[in-house]
């Protein structure tokens, strides 16, 4: 039996879309040119954040996602069993600290509170009680109790396992080549279907051209350091206030800001960097040094902990910093779910629900209009 929908891309976004559709009874096949969950998702930190988003459409989608993730994980646990559905969900909360510009941090948090985010402005003393290893140079901080973390590969593979349990297919090493009436051309032949979802992440722009409906999605590279196993623990997801500016910036040159967090494996992840260098995956030592330098400024004890490895990946960047979610009016049957840049893990649950709502004609979980494909920043003039 032919699928109703083929999802191109088996990362966290494609997996979330496929899961939400399959939960509603839609027949789904997911294909990926490589290993499922092996691209951008495998290079992620697992951020599920409200703290880095100003009021607006992306924050609304993040709020829907943060509310949905625990419910979705409970559903997956019921379907697959607790062991197969383990994604290392950790509702640890976030801590944004300022070493200067305290007023800007307080103003940002105030705007978020007006949008319904729990953002508690605390003193430097309070911050050191929450994270005793922080530098005493902290001047102020904001505590975000609803920030969380999960393991990205486990999350994506669990969502895909649910799709398969409901009768769908997940196929790796299959490359999408373009859309024809009635289905999708692939490296394994023609795949009949009623609709195709472009969830190709940083490669979504390339596939959109093959599909005859180009969108402006570009790769933006990021790098993460991983320490060796250590008893040193960071209790929350901690980052400096510069992180918000780096996320919102559209600059192509290198930008770094400090993000530090512990993992259940006993390592510490240190990020983050952002630069637009195409698909150049060269590991640049100056970038690694800058990440380490800034992390040590925030947590001085990190200077004594060895870095075990570094890894990098490409995030799907949209010029207006908003995902592209919904149908493409230029090609019947073509849908997009991409452009989440570094927020894909956190936004995945809401994105999947929004795609399913729109596809099935249900009331959407958030206003879909800001994410439409036919906006000038994303769709080139023809």
Image (spheres, rainbow, N blue to C red):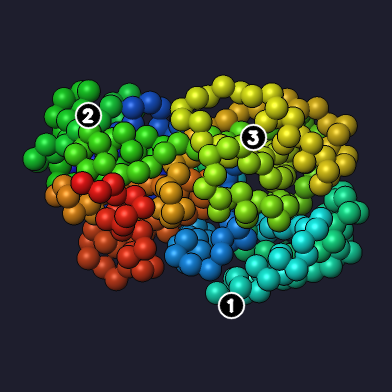
First in sequence: mark 3 or mark 2?
A: 2
Q: Which residue is drawn at 26% across and 61% down?
A: 358
Q: Dot 1: few (<14), some (14–19), or many (≥20) neighbours within 10 Å?
A: few
Q: Using the rendered view, name the quadrant where residue 120 is placed.
A: bottom right
Q: Which element is circle 2 on? A: strand
Q: Is residue 50 visible?
A: yes
Q: Distance between the residues labelled 1 and 3?
A: 33 Å
Most distant residue in the bottom direction: 114
Q: Residue at x 36, y 63 (%)?
A: 370
Q: Can residue 19 be seen in this view?
A: no
Q: How many marks?
A: 3
Mark 1 touches mark 3? (CB < 8 Å) = no
Q: Using the rendered view, name the quadrant where residue 245 is placed.
A: bottom right
Q: Residue at x 80, y 58 (%)?
A: 100
Q: Mark 3 points at which residue?
A: 224
First in sequence: mark 1 or mark 3?
A: 1
Q: Mark 2 points at which residue?
A: 177
Q: Which element is circle 1 on? A: helix
**Closest to the observer, 346 or 177:** 177
Horizontal and vertical percent for residue 270? 70, 39
Q: In this view, does 115 lie to the left or right of 145?
A: left
Q: Residue at x 19, y 39 (%)?
A: 212
Q: Mark 1 points at which residue?
A: 114
Q: Is residue 211 above or below residue 242?
A: above
**Closest to the observer, 20 or 108:** 108
Q: Residue 40 carries which label?
A: none
Q: Which element is circle 3 on? A: strand
């Amino acid at each position: 039996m032919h699928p109703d929908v083929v999802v191109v891309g088996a990362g966290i976004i494609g997996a979330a879309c496929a899961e939400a559709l399959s939960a509603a009874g839609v027949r789904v096949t997911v294909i990926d040119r490589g290993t499922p969950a092996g691209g951008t998702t495998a290079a992620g930190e697992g951020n599920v954040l409200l703290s880095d988003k100003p009021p607006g459409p992306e924050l609304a989608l993040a709020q829907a996602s943060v509310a949905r993730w625990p419910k979705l994980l409970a559903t997956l646990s019921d379907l697959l069993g607790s062991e197969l559905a383990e994604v290392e969900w950790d509702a640890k909360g976030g801590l944004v600290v300022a070493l200067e510009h305290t007023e800007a941090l307080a103003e940002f948090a105030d705007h978020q509170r007006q949008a319904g985010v729990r953002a508690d402005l605390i003193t430097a003393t309070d911050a050191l009680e929450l994270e005793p290893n922080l530098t005493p140079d902290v001047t102020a901080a904001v505590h975000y109790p609803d920030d969380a973390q999960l393991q990205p590969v486990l999350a994506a593979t669990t969502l895909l396992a649910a799709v398969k349990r409901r009768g769908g297919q997940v196929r790796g090493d299959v490359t999408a080549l373009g859309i024809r009436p009635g289905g999708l051309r692939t490296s394994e032949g023609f795949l009949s279907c009623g609709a195709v979802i472009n969830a190709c992440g940083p490669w979504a722009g390339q596939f959109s051209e093959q599909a005859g409906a180009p969108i402006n999605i570009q790769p933006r590279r990021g790098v993460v350091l991983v320490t060796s196993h250590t008893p040193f623990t960071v209790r929350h997801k901690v980052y400096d206030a510069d992180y918000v500016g780096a996320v919102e910036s559209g600059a192509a040159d290198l930008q770094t800001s400090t993000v530090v967090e512990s993992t259940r494996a006993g390592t510490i992840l240190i990020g983050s960097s952002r630069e637009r260098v195409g698909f150049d995956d060269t590991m640049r030592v100056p970038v690694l040094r800058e990440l380490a330098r800034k992390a040590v400024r925030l947590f001085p004890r990190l200077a004594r902990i060895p870095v075990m490895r570094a890894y990098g990946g490409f995030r799907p960047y949209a010029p207006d910093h908003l995902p592209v979610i919904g149908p493409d009016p230029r090609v019947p049957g073509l849908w997009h779910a991409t452009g989440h840049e570094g927020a894909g893990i956190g936004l995945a649950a809401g994105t999947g629900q929004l795609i399913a709502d729109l596809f099935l004609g249900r009331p959407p979980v958030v206003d879909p209009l800001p994410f439409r494909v036919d906006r000038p920043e994303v769709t080139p003039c023809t």
